[in-house]
Amino acid sequence: MAAGNRKVIVVESKNAYDQLLDDAGSNTYVLVEFYATWCGPCAMIGPRLEQLATEYSSRMLILKIDVDQNEDLAVQYEISSMPTFIIIKNRVTLTQFVGSNVDRVISMVEKHVGKMDESKAGKATEGTKASVSKI
């Protein structure tokens, strides 16, 4: 997948998750959202995650993990509330926080990853239809 076309990836299994972390390597940050389909705040933040995937396409990969479908990963990261976000680099968890506050998600991303890719900022907010790929 070309870096400029990155979208949020829905992780279907622990094996897929492990492969995505391996593929991210040591230079790419990974933002993971643990969510549930029945979680209203999770659904509300989804469109903003799509924008972040575009804005940070060269430096960050965004993954979504359904806690009901991937209990092993939810247990591994001790997830008790949704949405829970984790920022990982080189398989190391840099931060973990709970809640659907978009400003907090953005500030944590900026703290660890830096400001968004300026060339992507305008394109991300043009109202393009969000797409999610599943792995």
Image (cartoon, grey):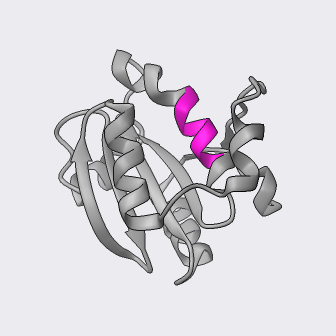
Identify the residue shown where x is 45% and y is 27%. 45
Question: Residue 57 versus residue 119: which sits nearer the camera?
Answer: 119
What residue appears at the point 73 percent right and 49 percent down from the top-left corner? Answer: 120
Q: Quadrant of residue 7?
A: top right
Query: Looking at the picture, does residue 113 appear above or below residue 52?
Result: below
**Taking 1 as reference, is 118 left or right?**
left
Please say whether residue 58 is one of the residues in the magenta stretch: no
Q: Is residue 39 visible?
A: no
Res 77 visible: yes
Measuring 37% from the left and 43% from the top, which residue is drawn there? 105
* Depicted 42 relative to depicted 29: above or below: above
Q: To which quarter of the image does residue 102 belong?
A: top left
Q: For residue 28, what is the image quadrant? A: bottom right
> Start and end of the magenta stretch?
47-53
Query: At which x and y percent is residue 126?
Result: 76, 27
Could you say where residue 82 lies in the image, as x and y percent from the top left? 27, 33
| Predominant SS of the magenta segment | helix
Q: Give the quarter of the figure containing the N terminus.
A: bottom right
